[in-house]
Image: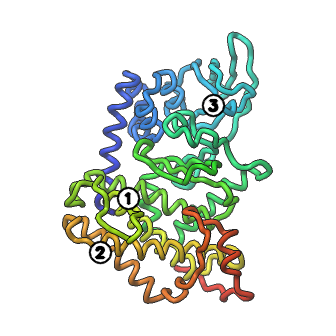
């Protein structure tokens, strides 16, 4: 992974450059030094896939322009919550959803004014939230994302009654904890991830897609502002982005068509995944298990969080075991693909030797695909005493 993902990032950057010059000729020159980073902007990929307009792309790119090159006026549009999204800067909150407005920017004091058909529109700047490494955090999907994934379009932000800042704080703590216990992996996902989008929608699982390469979409429904959930979802979804980058030339890894259905019969006819999709899953299960093991060994959590962590760990461990068996088919892989499988198998075997007994015997009756702690707790009541906390990993 460490050797292959940079080439994948360059591949996607080249694609972004093509999309940029097709949608807005001349904008790359205006971006100047910021063009290289902007060509890795997830919104650029989704804008191209959604066949967005040039004015929409210029609104997306406004914050990427050097202040000396930003226009004093710009046509903008609010989202379904009335926010004028300015990626890289923040958002102007208004009371007019889905409206075309005029933005006036004063370079001298960096102030913003909005108007509609000549009449002033009140707008309050919402501060941009970022994770360490320059990764933007969005509460609710950008309209460009919503056009590609209509099922996520209802997701406007955190549940009512939960402070917005609490999600950003928990997300930031989880990101830092991953960096502490799993630094080599964190450096890779920090290099490929550009945007974290928080969703609240019962119909949408967390996901990542090449149509928004560099973005991860985390469904916060029923999970609350909690580090344990965010650790799992960040390691999982950022892992998909990393794997997409490293295997962008999938023929280097698979000896069969990547969209071929996985030739594995579990006995109930339920296997419908593609070979490439299953290998994606195996890789993310390996890194999730490796991160969970480091969190448990470091004694990062106690009480409810420690109990939930073990519940999530044991569930992914179970899936990891299943996928290792399903993908134990050497004819599927090239030499490089076999190396990925063998690496994942070694991760599993190391965990099995050190903690396998503690990960067996958990009751997952009624458990949906996305882990539900309430159901897990009902089936697996926590012990009266939690194990003693260990010293953090050096």
Left/right placement of residue 337 relative to residue 345 reads left
- Judge by depth and name the residue closer to the eye, 66 or 145: 145
Q: Which of marks 2 and 1 precedes in the sequence?
A: 1
Where does label 3 land, which residue? 79
Left of 394 or right of it: where is 222? right
Question: Closer to the N terminus: mark 3 or mark 2?
Answer: 3
Residue displayed at 37% across by 37% down: 16
* Numbered tag placed on residue 272 in the rendering: 1
Q: Residue 286 at x, y = what percent?
A: 42, 71
Dot label at residue 342 = 2
Which is nearer the eye, 390 or 111? 390
The image's colouring method is rainbow
Q: Quadrant of residue 176?
A: bottom right
Q: Which mark is residue 243?
A: none
* 383 and 44: which is toward the camera: 383
- First in sequence: mark 1 or mark 3? 3
Residue occupying the point 34% across, 69% down: 265
Q: Nearer the viewer, residue 200 or 16?
A: 200
Camera-near label (1 vs 2) is: 1
Residue 93 in the image: state x and y as whole percent: 71, 32
Classify 10 Å Cα crowding around label 3: few (below 14), some (14-19), many (20 and above).
many
């Amino acid at each position: 992974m460490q050797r292959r993902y940079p080439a994948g990032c360059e591949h996607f950057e080249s694609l972004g450059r093509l999309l940029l010059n097709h949608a807005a000729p001349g904008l790359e020159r205006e971006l100047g030094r910021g063009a290289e980073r902007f060509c890795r902007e997830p919104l650029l990929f989704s804008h191209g896939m959604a066949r967005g307009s040039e004015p929409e792309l210029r609104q997306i790119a406004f914050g990427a322009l050097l202040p000396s090159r930003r226009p004093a006026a710009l046509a903008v549009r609010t989202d379904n919550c009335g926010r004028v999204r300015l990626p890289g800067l923040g958002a102007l909150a208004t009371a007019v959803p889905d409206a075309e407005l005029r933005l006036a920017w004063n370079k001298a004091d960096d102030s913003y004014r909005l108007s509609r058909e000549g009449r002033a529109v009140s707008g309050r700047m919402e501060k941009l939230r970022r994770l360490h490494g320059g990764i933007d955090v969005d509460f609710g999907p950008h309209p460009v994302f919503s056009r590609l994934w209509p099922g996520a379009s209802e997701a406007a932000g955190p549940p009512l009654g939960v402070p917005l800042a609490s999600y950003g704080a928990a997300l930031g703590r989880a990101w830092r904890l991953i960096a502490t216990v799993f630094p080599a992996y964190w450096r890779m996902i920090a290099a490929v991830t550009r945007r974290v989008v928080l969703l609240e929608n019962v119909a949408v699982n967390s996901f990542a897609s090449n149509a928004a390469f560099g973005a991860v979409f985390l469904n916060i429904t029923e999970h609350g502002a909690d580090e344990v959930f965010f650790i799992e979802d960040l390691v999982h979804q950022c892992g998909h982005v990393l794997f997409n980058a490293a295997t962008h030339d999938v023929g280097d890894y698979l000896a069969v068509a990547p969209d071929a259905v996985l030739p594995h019969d579990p006995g109930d006819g339920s296997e419908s995944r593609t070979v490439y999709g299953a290998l994606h899953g195996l890789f993310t299960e390996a890194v999730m298990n490796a991160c969970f093991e480091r969190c448990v060994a470091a004694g990062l959590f106690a009480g409810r969080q420690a109990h939930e962590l073990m519940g999530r760990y044991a569930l992914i461990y179970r899936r990891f075991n299943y996928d290792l068996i399903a993908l134990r088919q050497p004819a599927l892989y090239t030499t490089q693909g076999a190396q990925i499988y063998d690496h994942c198998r070694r991760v599993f075997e190391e965990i099995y030797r050190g903690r396998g007994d503690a990960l067996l015997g958990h009751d997952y009756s009624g458990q949906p695909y996305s882990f539900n702690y309430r159901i897990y707790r009902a089936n697996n009541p926590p012990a009266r005493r939690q194990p003693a906390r260990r010293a953090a990993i050096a």
